[in-house]
């Protein structure tokens, strides 16, 4: 299991890296087709919203995993 102290910086680095890749991917797709992808022109300035949404989902998933682990420990103690 990964150390909790390393998990948060790792997630920040991964999501931060994704933030820099999204505009590049849209540009590459526009160059390949000769036209911008549908919806890219209108949604270009909202990349931070998508990243925040992803972070929220990761936090919710982490919270659910944390609760499941605590519940497993309580059940283990009850079994003893």
Image (cartoon, helix red, strand yellow):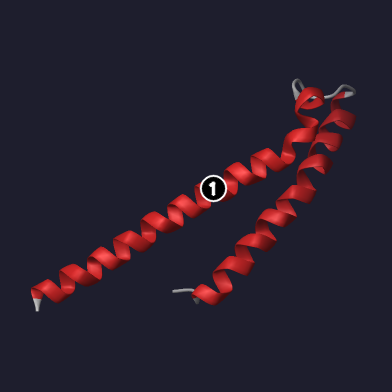
Image coordinates for residue 45, horizontal then vertical, percent: 79, 34
**Mark 1 falls on what kind of element?**
helix
- Quarter of the picture containing the C terminus is bottom left
Does residue 48 appear to the left or right of 29 in the view shown? left
How dense is the environment of label 1, judged by Cα within 10 Å: few (below 14), some, or many (20 and up)? few
Q: Nearer the viewer, residue 27 or 64?
A: 64
Which quadrant of the view contains residue 9? bottom right
Q: Compared to 18, does 80 lie above or below?
A: below
Task: Residue under label 1, please give it.
Answer: 56
- Quarter of the picture containing the N terminus is bottom left
Q: How many marks can you see?
A: 1
| Residue at x-position 57% and y-position 74% | 6
Q: Compared to 59, does 40 lie above or below?
A: above
Does residue 17 appear to the left or right of 2 in the view shown? right
Which quadrant of the view contains residue 40? top right
Image coordinates for residue 58, horizontal then vertical, percent: 52, 52
Image coordinates for residue 10, horizontal then vertical, percent: 62, 66
Image coordinates for residue 23, horizontal then vertical, percent: 81, 40
Q: Compared to 16, does 74 lie above or below?
A: below
Does residue 61 appear to the left or right of 43 in the view shown? left
Q: Compared to 47, does 71 lie above or below?
A: below
| Residue at x-position 79% and y-position 32% | 44
């Amino acid at each position: 299991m990964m150390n909790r102290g390393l998990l948060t910086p790792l997630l920040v680095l991964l999501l931060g890296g994704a933030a820099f890749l999204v505009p590049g991917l849209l540009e590459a797709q526009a160059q390949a087709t000769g036209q911008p992808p549908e919806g890219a022109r209108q949604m270009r300035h909202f990349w931070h919203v998508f990243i925040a949404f992803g972070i929220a989902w990761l936090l919710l998933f982490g919270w659910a995993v944390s609760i499941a682990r605590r519940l497993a420990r309580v059940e283990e103690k009850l079994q003893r």
